[in-house]
Amino acid sequence: MECSRLDGATDRTRSVPCLETHESAGRARQPIGHTRRARSGTPGRRAMTDRPTRVSEATPNLTGMSAVDAYGAVAPHRAAFLPPTPPVRVPQLRVPAPIRHGWARARTVGAVTTGALCTLVAISFDSGFRTPDGAPAHWLDVVAFLVGLTLAGLLVLRRRFPVYLCLAASAAAIVLPLDSFAALLTLTWVIATASTRTAWLCGAAAATATGAALWKDSARPPQDMVLAGKDQVTGVISYASAAGFWTVAILCLATFVGAGLVRRWRNVAAAAVADKEAQVVTTHQLRDRMSRQEERELIAREVHDTVAHHISLISLQASALEVDRGAGGPEVRAAAQQMRSSAQHAIAEMRGLLTTLRTGTEDDPLPGATLEDLAGLLDNLRRHGRWVTSSVYVTDAQTAAPTLTRAVFRIVQESVTNALKHAPGQPIEVDVRASRQAGVTIRVVNPVRPGPAIAAPGTGSGILGMRERAERLGGRFDARVDGGWHVVTAYLPWVPHP
């Protein structure tokens, strides 16, 4: 069989759950009243002096835990410094969507209908003034009628183009014998949405149009005025005075300007509430991120002080055994050399893990093992007398994402390690097939050996970690015993390189 090589990135995250458990257990042994000095170099934190730990800090509080805390990395004293608070939304009275949409359509229909009726009223009174009985309509009234109906129909777009509609309706009311209803209605949306300068400009135009429409009505004979009435008994025509026309103009402007200001204030209040909610969410995210980063730094420090120290001792002892001529034959020295090489490789991988924990860049590829090292892993097992049969077929390797290559390598590595641990001396079959169209399929098979397995240390979370890697990429994982064979299968969808 042959193995193909594939470049990729690496991963160093499988030791984190075990380390989190160790750290949690270590903190649980701290007595109440234990003092601790905070590091002044921690980003986002202020240097703090020694202070006694409160009882509430020594006891984990589930309500003050972040998302990482809930999965094992309990940091009660961190939660006391930066307690994550859930986003608080200001309760608002929300009208159901069907009612809101129906009311909006009704208002639009009412605006268009009112605009058309006002146009008909204005044209009918002006036509009686310009055209004698029985004569054809004046051309100016025809033009005004068409323009008025067009403006009434365009009121559907008053929310999108309020400025243009307001200026156009104001100009039409000044030049043609039309009323200023369309200009005043669109003015409310201009005041609610436009800048202050634009609102003043459109307000001046609408006020001029209103004054022009009322002036033209007051210039007609009393019998052709809109603001006039005839007594059916005496036949006397009563019409508004100059003060009455001024009162009507002021009331119209005040009504529509007031409606626009109310709408504008509502928009400002809604924007303020939305901004406050966004700030609360951002603050919550920053608190959670800072808490996560502090936990990362704490884990990295403990790993460096404990695990790295013991691995370094193993490397030194293996080196001493390798150079000791009286310790044994060539086989012992070769085993010592392999032990030293493995310890040095573990230290290099741990150094990359600690760098990632301190920087907090979860998505950055870690240095070390790639799919290219998969062939080396299997060849190394063969050189040390392991019975491994491998078949690896990979196409479009250069387009695979680092997250995919890391997951494939780690699943194969952990599956082979479990086979060596629980079925020593038994043959292992490894089959990996990867392509852009079909995704990645992994199959590791070994016969189940009766009797005790090799007493090798471990966390007991290898299968769980492999399943998490596969599911994180949207794939599947399964490990079972089938007819005397231990079968590990995994499928990962193809993830292209970003």
Image (cartoon, grey):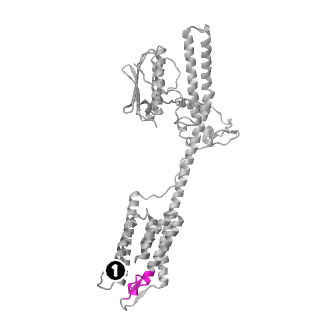
Q: Residue furthest front?
A: 139
Is 161 situated left or right of 200 in this image?
A: left
Is 323 situated left or right of 67 in this image?
A: right
In percent of width and height, residue 312 lies at: 61, 22
Choose between 366 and 315: the one closer to the eye. 366
Look at label 1 and name its amino acid.
Answer: His
Residue shown at 37%/91% (left/top)? 235
Choose between 398 and 257: the one closer to the eye. 398
Tell me if residue 333 can be seen. yes
How many dots with numbers? 1
| Magenta region includes residue 221 | yes
Choose between 52 and 112: the one closer to the eye. 112
Query: Measured along the vertical axis of the image, is residue 97 above or below residue 283?
Result: below
In percent of width and height, residue 147 lies at: 37, 72
Residue hosting label 1: 138
Tell me if residue 75 can be seen. no
Q: Quarter of the image holding residue 58? A: top right
What span is in magenta?
Answer: 215-231
